[in-house]
Image (tube, rainbow, N blue to C red):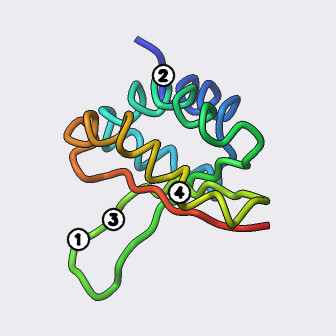
Amino acid sequence: MASTIEITQSLEQLYTFGRADEIQSFLSANPCLVPLLEEAYPHIRRYFPDAQLLLEVITDTEVAGWVTLFLHIISSQPEKALGKLHEFEDDYWLDNLDRSQNKLSFSIGYR
């Protein structure tokens, strides 16, 4: 079995990490996300071929215990990005949402 560091290095080839130590800890606590992130990558790229894909652990201070991994899709085409996100969700994500155990969310950002 691959170590957490090896897993993190593998995912860093696909995604930009906000804070690597936080992401590594989160993925260690939520190992179901690792294969899901690897599998989702080509599906995301189908809709966002040139976007930066930024992973970030977010904690909601108003909801006790609420911590999730956000995948920010940073696009240079804001007029198309939200529609593409809806297509991705309909075509891929909704069928795989349960696998994330509500620990992975997507957002659109603009550059």
- Distance, label 4 to label 2, CA atoms, is 37 Å
- Distance, label 4 to label 1, CA atoms, is 31 Å
**Neighbour tally class for label 3: few under 14, some 14-19, many 20 plus, Cα within 10 Å:** some
Which residue is depicted at the point 47% across and 16% down?
2
Question: Residue type at mark 2?
Answer: Ser
First along the sequence among labels 4 and 2:
2
Which residue is depicted at the point 80% across and 67% down?
111
Q: Position of residue 105 (x, y in %)?
A: 40, 56
The residue nearer to you, when weighing 59 against 94, is 94
Q: Is residue 38 above or below residue 75?
A: above
Image side of residue 87 versus residue 82, left or right: left
Examine the image and state in which quarter residue 10 appears. Answer: top right
Image side of residue 22 versus residue 65, left or right: right
The residue nearer to you, when weighing 111 against 7, is 111
Indicate the secondary structure of the residue bearing disc 2.
loop
Q: Position of residue 35 (x, y in %)?
A: 40, 24
- Distance, label 4 to label 3, CA atoms, is 26 Å
First along the sequence among labels 2 and 1:
2
Which residue is depicted at the point 37% across and 34% down?
92
Circle 4 sits on which residue? 83
Circle 1 sits on which residue? 65
**Neighbour tally class for label 2: few under 14, some 14-19, many 20 plus, Cα within 10 Å:** few
Q: Are discs 4 and 1 less than 8 Å apart at CB?
A: no
Q: Is residue 51 above or below residue 77?
A: above
Circle 2 sits on which residue? 3
Q: Are discs 1 and 3 less than 8 Å apart at CB?
A: yes
The image's mark for residue 67 is: 3
Q: Nearer the viewer, mark 4 or mark 1?
A: 4
